[in-house]
Amino acid sequence: MLPKSLKTTLTAVAAVTVLAVPATAQDKLKIGFLFPSPIADVGWSAELNHGRQAIEEHFGDQVETIFVENVPEGPDAARIMNQMAAQGAGMIMLGSFGYMNDGLKLAQQRPDMTFIHASGYKLAPNLGNFQSRNYESSYLVGMAAADVTETDTVGIVAAYAIPEVVGMINGFALGVQEVNPDVTIKVVWLNSWFDPPKAQESARALMAQQADVIYSLYQDTPSVVSVAEEEGVWVINTSSDMKDYAPNWLLASQIADWSTYFIESTQATIDGTFEGTAFWGGMADDTVDVKSWSSSISAETMAKIEAAAAAIRAGEFHPLTGPILDQEGTERLADGEVIEDGAMASIDWLVSGVETRIPQ
Amino acid sequence: MDVLIFIVSGTLAAATALLFAAMGELVAEKSGMLNLGIEGMMATGAAMGFVALSVSGSHSVGFLAAAVLGAVLSLIYAMLTLVFRANQVASGLAIGILGLGLSSAIGKNYEGKTVTGLEELDLGPLSDIPLLGPMFFQQDVMVYLSIVLIFATWYLLNRTKLGLIIRAIGESPESAHALGLKVRLIRAGCVAFGGAMAGIGGAYMSTAYTPLWAEGMIAGRGWIVVALTVFGTWIVKRVAFGAYLFGSISLLELSIQAFGVNVPSQLMSAMPYIVTIVMLAVISRNPVFIRLNSPASLGATLKLN
């Protein structure tokens, strides 16, 4: 047994040695990534990882990336990001909302580093956050859903009623109504971020009530997509393209591509020009897009979709443009009024025509 | 009508994984072994079953591999508690956590992948009966096996000599030992059976019910199993009733949401838990009856040499 003081000294020496190493290799930017779930072929973490690969491809030898997947929010996340900082990371990507407070704390301790955080709302001079305007692509897939439905019923499987999800349901519903105002829109709230069997049960529950298009909203696994393929029901999914899981019945996939933002942030870190801003990427900057349109969508609707997409890209059209009534019949946006970004970021009401109430 | 079919046929399928694991846990608990590692064993079974099915292409191989690994995990628990006399609660929790970690390691390269689910059994004309056919006779073989398992478990515990021995050991392992019964061996056997059934239950989730592997997909169902055995007061028919009740309320909740009924969905999501616990608590409210059925040595450290 070593005396306690000696043990402490040895630990301290070891710690200093570890810290001393990266200082010699300062010219190469080390970027750390924290992913909230295992990196699979598809899903949220997979898309963030594509952003990491894009950085490696773009900068080559200038950067080195390290990553840890399946990091639980809380003390583990804090430990891992501190360890990355100790290993000499100059930039860290925080892939989950719940990493926000620990990330902010570290950002304040280490003004020499930069941080980019997914879907948070707190900022610092060296901490920026990023989100996508998925409601734009939701509007487009909603138009397609209205085109293919024969029962005039579409169903949505959603996780939690957070503003981003609510905004996407609204975008989707408005897209549906643009093509066919008579379509009934049903929602099942899972009240769970991750429960593939329950997501699949929800899809079946919606099918039992005549829904012949299922909108799988932020289900990270192909649970809903594969049951739709099995049952022969149209399906739309988010985050990743899941064409391989439903070759016959995938109507479209909404995708988010973080490459541009990740590369810009990395460049800014290298140049020393990084500013902690809130990035809200949409179709205009190619962060958001729709892939794998089904050929079963009618040519007429497809032309409408393309026109709407072009208008959104050009900044001429916002899916949430008045007149819009909420479920209670209250006018939320007057004729011609466009929702402001602040209101969109904290949206907590559903448009009229959506049958299921929002959980309060 | 579709909704009714969805709920009835869905309940049979939804309860299947719970029934396998619960019948196994019931036998283990009747012998006095409180195995709290069910969640981990189901997760390991789900991962192992999925990988074995992906590699071999055979569902039977998947279930077999899941059962074997579940049994191996539970035997570690048996060794800790019976040989080294470790605390049952702590050991069970530790093995459960080990199982969750193991499931993640086994399924690492299969994350987010899908397989073809178990096919429905062809029951000929039965499957074509209107209403009843789609409700009861368009299910996969494991759904029917889980029903057979309910009766087999009841028969084993209440009508066989082995069942009597298991129950005797659960009441007082010391007395059973004095009678010359092999307490450790029988307890280990019961625990291994429980682990194997939990493994099969897990594999049912990943290869039949939701044919895909994603880490964490068991999502607390192992804990429901533990709760069902306790709230079902260790009586086979009550545990089975609890599993079906839980399954049906889970699906009913989703259907009610889809109907657009104005009820807070958080409350709806809690309904399966609330209803199952309240119902089982109501039918099991007789304290004398609970004491009679509860294995007296459950969770206690073995006091034998």
Image (spheres, coloured by chain):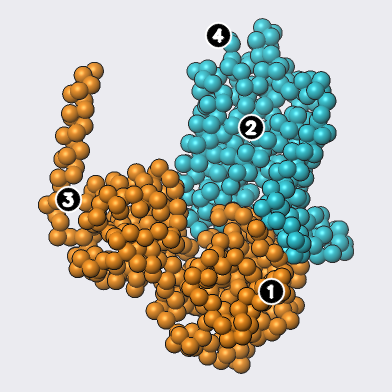
Chain colours: A orange, B cyan
Q: Which chain carries label 2?
A: B
Q: Mark 3 lies on which chain?
A: A
Q: Which amino acid does label 3 sit on?
A: Pro
Residue to which mark 1 is pinned: A330
- Considering depth in this image, is B118 or B35 the residue closer to the camera? B35
Measuring 66% from the left and 40% from the top, which residue is drawn there? B224
Q: Which of marks 1 and 3 is in front?
A: 1
Q: Distance between the residues labelled 1 and 2?
A: 60 Å
Quarter the N terminus of chain A occupies: top left
> Mark 4 and 3 residues: CB-CB less than 8 Å, in contact?
no
Residue A259 percent coordinates (x, y): 35, 71
Residue at the far top: name it.
Answer: B178
Measuring 75% from the left and 50% from the top, which residue is drawn there? B249
Secondary-structure class at tag 2: helix
Horizontal side, residue A342 vs residue B230: left or right: left
> Mark 4 and 1 residues: CB-CB less than 8 Å, in contact?
no
Q: Are there few (<14), some (14-19), or many (20+) residues within 10 Å of tag 4?
A: few
Q: Distance between the residues labelled 4 and 3?
A: 57 Å
Residue to which mark 3 is pinned: A22
Secondary-structure class at tag 1: loop
Residue to which mark 2 is pinned: B193
Earlier-in-chain disc, 1 versus 3: 3
Q: What residue type is labelled 4?
A: Asn
